[in-house]
Amino acid sequence: MKPDIVTTAAWNWVAGDLPTPERDRTACFGEDLCRFLKKKRQDLGIPTAAETAPVGQFDCVVGWGLIPGPEAEMTLARSFRLLRPGGGALFYGFRRDPSPEDVYEWGRRCRELGGDGFFPLPLPGATELAPVIAALNASPFDHFGVRREGICFRALLRRGEGEE
């Protein structure tokens, strides 16, 4: 399914934000995001669907829409198992409470992609950051950080070198 214009703008930002993995091994949660990244970032290698990927083989795991709850707990646990020691996971999603300046800026980005620049708030799947942080605290990852990025958030998680 083709993403809407706001999601396309967000995924363009995600594609630009992702680091190039050292060994070209990226796993991706979400079939639509995986297809999008294959088109936008050939340097990622061929992103592998995280749901069926072999464990312990990846430098980077990426996902969209980390909604706190049982599914997020399973996603985070699966991400940890997919990563090689020292690997990182990046999860992105829409924030429930963006500032007016953030909304205006992302409206401009949507207009650049051919949209009218208007979108409903809160965006579908938008979440508060406190429950996201709580889910990350309960995850197997020892190191993580969460940042507000316009109408989105980015959660960076790192698997330690010696973690099993």
Image: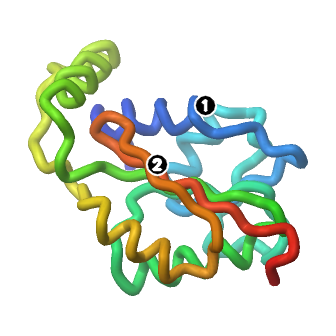
Residue type indicated by callout 2 = Arg
Query: What residue occupies the far top of the structure in this picture?
Result: 112
Residue sitting at x 41%, y 64%? 66
Corner quadrant of residue 8: top left
Residue type indicated by callout 1 = Lys
Disc 2 secondary structure class: strand
Q: Nearer the viewer, residue 138 or 116?
A: 138
Left or right of residue 16: residue 93: left
Image x and y of residue 129, in percent: 31, 60
Image x and y of residue 162, in percent: 87, 75
Corner quadrant of residue 116: top left
Image x and y of residue 94, in percent: 30, 49
Residue wearing tag 2: 154
Look at the picture and state if 45 lies above or below 131: above
Q: Which mark is residue 40?
A: 1
Residue sitting at x 27%, y 50%? 95
Residue sitting at x 55%, y 75%? 76
Select label 2 or label 1 by which is in front.
Answer: 2
Q: Which mark is residue 80?
A: none
Disc 1 secondary structure class: helix
Look at the picture and state if 65 lies above or below 109: below
